[in-house]
Amino acid sequence: MRITTSLTRMWLTRSIKPFIFKNEYDERLPFSDCGNLGLYVHIPFCKSICSFCPYCKVKYEKDLCDKYIDALIREIHLVGSQHSGKKTTTSLYFGGGTPALAADRLEEIMDAIGEHFIITEGIGVELHPDNVDPSLLRILKDAGVTKISIGIQSFQRKYQSVLGRTSVDIAALKEALAAVPFETVSMDFIFALPAQTFEDLKADIDTAFQNGANHVAIYPFIDFTFTASKVTPMPKKEKHALLDAITLYCMEQGYARSSIWTFSSKKDAKYSSMTRDNFLGFGCSATTLLKNQFKINTFSVEEYCKRVGDGKLPTSLTIRFSLRQRMIYYLFWTAYSTKVNAADFESFFGVPLKRMYGMELKIAKLLGFITQENDNYHMTLKGAFYYHYYENFYTLAYIDKMWGIMRKEAFPEHLEL
């Protein structure tokens, strides 16, 4: 697995140099000139910990949560005050964890954001199904939230049991969503679970769209080495067939495909905190991507609060990109939307896409991974599966290693990937 990702990295970056992360960071972040800048806020608290979840999270305690939110607001001001005036940004997303556990302070966080940033494309919040009741939804809407994403994972008891989740009251869910409408209501599902069939996944998607969702995200199950999950991943051949079948079904239903894993019944319904040219991340484990660097905050809630309390940024690791490394990062996450625009690439990097990756584009066309229409390169069904397949390699070879180390060390000295 690491051989595959290493060879691909060397080929695409034209270098044998690995991705090198160091325990360093800039006190002043160069985001003022960044276009298409997004914002992300991480709330790590959960009432219970799901065995399959790899994200940075801790068991909820009100006092610890309040201490964390105080530090979070201070980090927002530390970074935001570095720009003169208010910086225009595309969107703001709250992830976790379970952000709803801090609902009583969400408006306070957004007020801090509002002192430094202008949001043009809305505010999104991730929710646990248990959070979806009219009173909490009204709190979110009154605070300015325009999009919600509900982590259903599966409506079916057999998979809820596998994932350690409780059943979802579908009627109550539908009633709450009808009472407090949002621009986007997304529901997340996991595919490629043991013995999962097309009919299983189709039933989940149909149930979502029939009960308040206008957007669904179908994420593949990934077997992270540091989680306590006992779920066995689905074999490649079965996973390929399942992804193709559910994609064709969604397209036959007229659902718009906005990314590898997402489909919407309403054209303007979108939910994605990842596909941004640049973004600032606030909170423990949050990442920041700028033109020439990528940084990740410490995973430790206690060390995060301590570092920010000392008036310093809570950065744990930083990579300074070479030009080719930044191009690969750009292309990898832009391709998540199933297309890459050559003019956008040239605008961002000041060099034509074909000049940098003309040979790779020709090979991708010959292999049936992409088609071209003017400046746009569109991913085929075959290309989408192999993107997913490589993303799985990337996740287990790079992200699994990084997150596994950072869960144990608040500020590692050095990391090579």
Image (cartoon, rainbow, N blue to C red):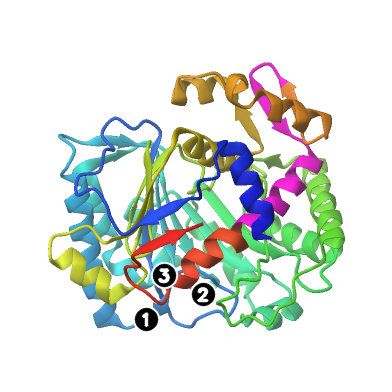
Separation of disc 3 and disc 2 at Cα?
Answer: 30 Å
Of badges 1 and 2, the one in the foreground is 1
Residue 73 percent coordinates (x, y):
21, 59
* Residue 86 in sight: yes
Mark linked to residue 130:
2
- The residue lying at 65 percent from left, 48 percent from top is 7
Location of mark 3 (residue): 406
- The residue lying at 53 percent from left, 58 percent from top is 149
User: What SS does tag 3 mark?
Assistant: helix
In magenta stretch: residue 26: no
Taking the image as shown, residue 14 lies to the left or right of residue 244, namely left
- The secondary structure that most of the magenta stretch takes on is helix
Mark linked to residue 379:
none
Q: What residue span does the magenta drawing correspond to?
A: 373-394
Which quadrant would residue 136 be assigned to in this image?
Answer: bottom left
At label 2, the amino acid type is Asp
* Residue 335 in sight: no
Q: Report crowding for label 2: few under 14, some 14 to 19, many 20 or more residues within 10 A (C-alpha).
A: some
Taking the image as shown, residue 65 lies to the left or right of residue 184, namely left
Count of labels in the image: 3
At label 1, the amino acid type is Tyr
Location of mark 1 (residue): 60
Residue 279 percent coordinates (x, y):
38, 44
Where 134 sits versus 362, above or below? below
Circles 3 and 2, Cβ within 8 Å, touching? The answer is: no
User: What SS does tag 2 mark?
Assistant: helix
Nearest to N terminus: mark 1 or mark 3: 1
Nearest to N terminus: mark 1 or mark 2: 1
